Image: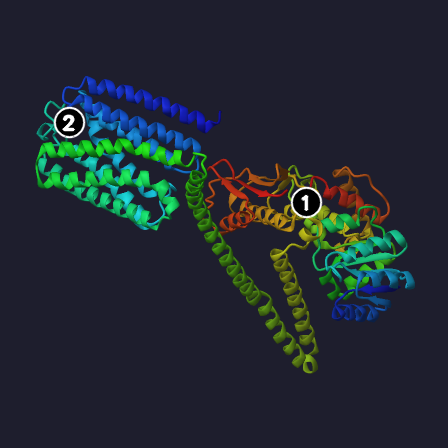
Amino acid sequence: MRVVVADDSTLLREGVVRLLEEAGIEVAGQAGDGEELLRKVRAHKPDVALVDVRMPPTHTDEGLRAARQIRSELPGIGVLVLSQYVEVAYARELLAESAEGLGYLLKDRVADVEALTDAVRRVGEGGSVLDPEVVSQMLGRRRRDDPLAELTPREREVLALMAEGRSNAAIAAELVVTERAVEKHVTGIFSKLELSTSGEDHRRVLAVLRFLDQDS
Amino acid sequence: MSGLRRALVALGVLAFLIGLLSTALILTSDHASPRGLLLALVLAAGWSFAFTGLYAWDRRPQNSTGALMTATGFAWFFQALSASNNEWIFALGIVGQNLSFAILIHLLVTFPSGRLRTRPQIATVALAYLATGPLQLAWALFVDPATQSGCEGCPGNPVLIGGAEGVADVINVFQLLGGVTAIALAIALLVSHWRRSSTAERRVLTPVLATGGTAFSILLVQLVVSELVSSHTFQAVAFVIAVAIFACLPFAFLLGLLRSRIGRAEEVSTALTAENEQLTAELEAKVEELRASRHRIVEAGYAERRRVERDLHDGAQQRLMALTMTLRLAREKLDGDPAASAELLDEAMEELGSATAELREFARGIHPVVLSDRGLAAALNGLAERSPVPVEIAAAPAERLPMPVESAAYFVVAESLTNVARYAEAGLATVRVERRDGNLEVEISDDGAGGADPGAGTGLRGLADRIAALDGSFDVRSEAGEGTTVEARIPCE
């Protein structure tokens, strides 16, 4: 697995690079702004680009724009966006077309090496990663006539993990249940929320997020 | 016809009818004398004050001079009521007969702005109202008109508490002292106003201040002398002269107005001066408001910095200190007790995670990044998502607006939703932000308990200042049991 890391803070970038290399992930290049990131990605064709949202020159959303550029220009490359804040609005933008090979994580997560390397691997393999905080914001939103009220607590947990982009196997491991049990919960959730089941994990993420995002 | 003009016409008709009623009361009176003179004075002063007042009111609705003139006219008609043979109408007339003098003092000392601004002005006017209002009423409760000179044939006093003549006399002394002081103060204020005015301003002030000042001077002399010399003839003559000049006053006001309308160059400058005088007065009041709100904004800025300092100190700084100590402990235990060291390191990482999360929330409270990056609609959605009370965003502008407007609208919604969650016990809050007629209209309503007091918290006060700084308007409606609606209108072309 090869990655390019883009962050304007050298301190943070070096830290992330060190963590990734220790976990056996090859860092092919580093960038300090959006332009440099695009050059490095075009040159190295990594599996994943790790992108900070705020970078020079405007320090607003360069990372997001670069991420979109990479996705349209080089669709095979996974993009993992890191941000000081996670906002549902940004997640919505990033996921507008597809959740394939896309991740959106709170920057704090880099401190957890396992979570970081797991996210990089999943995105590199075409999966999706959505920060638990985004998911909990979406799930936590109070609605009138809340359809989520019909879910059991266990089903809510499963729904949250699905929205984060986890596979059934990963959900089973996390909740310490069998995969068969997870499948049963997933079917239950989809029928209660009147969603059509779809096989691949990243499509499933989109279906779940679209559902959570409606009535906004 | 505008609502105001309709109301003014109605008041004019009312003044006319009251005049007719007064005529009937005076002409059929058993005790008023001489009737002809009294009738002439009542109608001349009452009608002229009321009609010129309504005219001035119509021309300058923002300025209370017109309203005060109108009120003087209406109060003047109390004089006619005391001519009535009916004891109740008579008593009403006795109670109200001096009120118009107090309103006139109010009018004169505030001319031409119509605003009470300085302490001496407020004290003078308050004293005048005290003497002619509450004290007059108290006096009326104790006075038996039959014992008063010049009131032979007056009806009895139906509200008489007891024939305690002594009490009435004592009240009368206080009234007299209050009245004389108020008039003397008013004259002093008029003189000082005159001396501070420019030549051009004086042209407008002259007719009003001269007539008013003379009328009150004579009234003052009459009040003082009548106590020393009990000559009814002198008292009556002085009173008639004062009232005759009093009746001329509204024409002096009218003259001031006319002077400011004639088209000749010199007169135009006078007219401009008059308008200027009024505009300046209004402007000064506005400047005073602005100064106060700017002061509050600066204060709020300092308060905000203190809050930031305290939050950083109590939050992040303390956590980092604790973290340093935990790490130091872990370092010491590294060799002797690796297990304990690992535990301490885990603890440190957890502590660090909380500190980071806390800092993030803190920074979001200072400035929401999504607002500057993606605009109001996205930021409002974020607020709705984090609100513990269900929030429906009924409308939000999709386009970007000037940053100060977006920011003000955002904080109005944020603060209001915080209040809804804290106090309203609401089941649903509705947010509506729309552009209409060159404004951004922001409305947050809930179906909760209502009864919020906009003056109570600093939050709403701060919002009002923030909006005022953008020349917008801010309003809170919160009837108990009917939910709360916060409305802000921010200019936004």
Q: Which residue is mark 2?
A: B157
Tell me how far mark 2 sits from mark 1, CA to CA: 71 Å
- Element class at badge 1: helix
Please tell me how crowded label 1 is: few (under 14), some (14-19), or many (20+) other residues with Cα within 10 Å. many
- The percent position of residue B309, horizontal first and vertical second, equals 55, 65
Q: Residue at x 43, y 47 (%)?
A: B285
**Chain to which the residue tagged by mark 1 belongs:** B
| Residue A80 screen position, x and y as percent | 81, 58
- Please, what is the three-letter code of the amino acid marked with disc 2? Asn
Is residue A170 visible in the rendered image? The answer is no
Q: Is residue A59 left or right of residue B477?
A: right
Q: Nearer the viewer, residue B319 or B246?
A: B246
Mark 1 is on which residue type?
A: Ala
Indicate the quadrant containing the C terminus of chain B: top left, top right, bottom left or bottom right.
top right
Task: List the residue tagged with mark 1.
Answer: B377
Q: Quadrant of residue B241?
A: top left
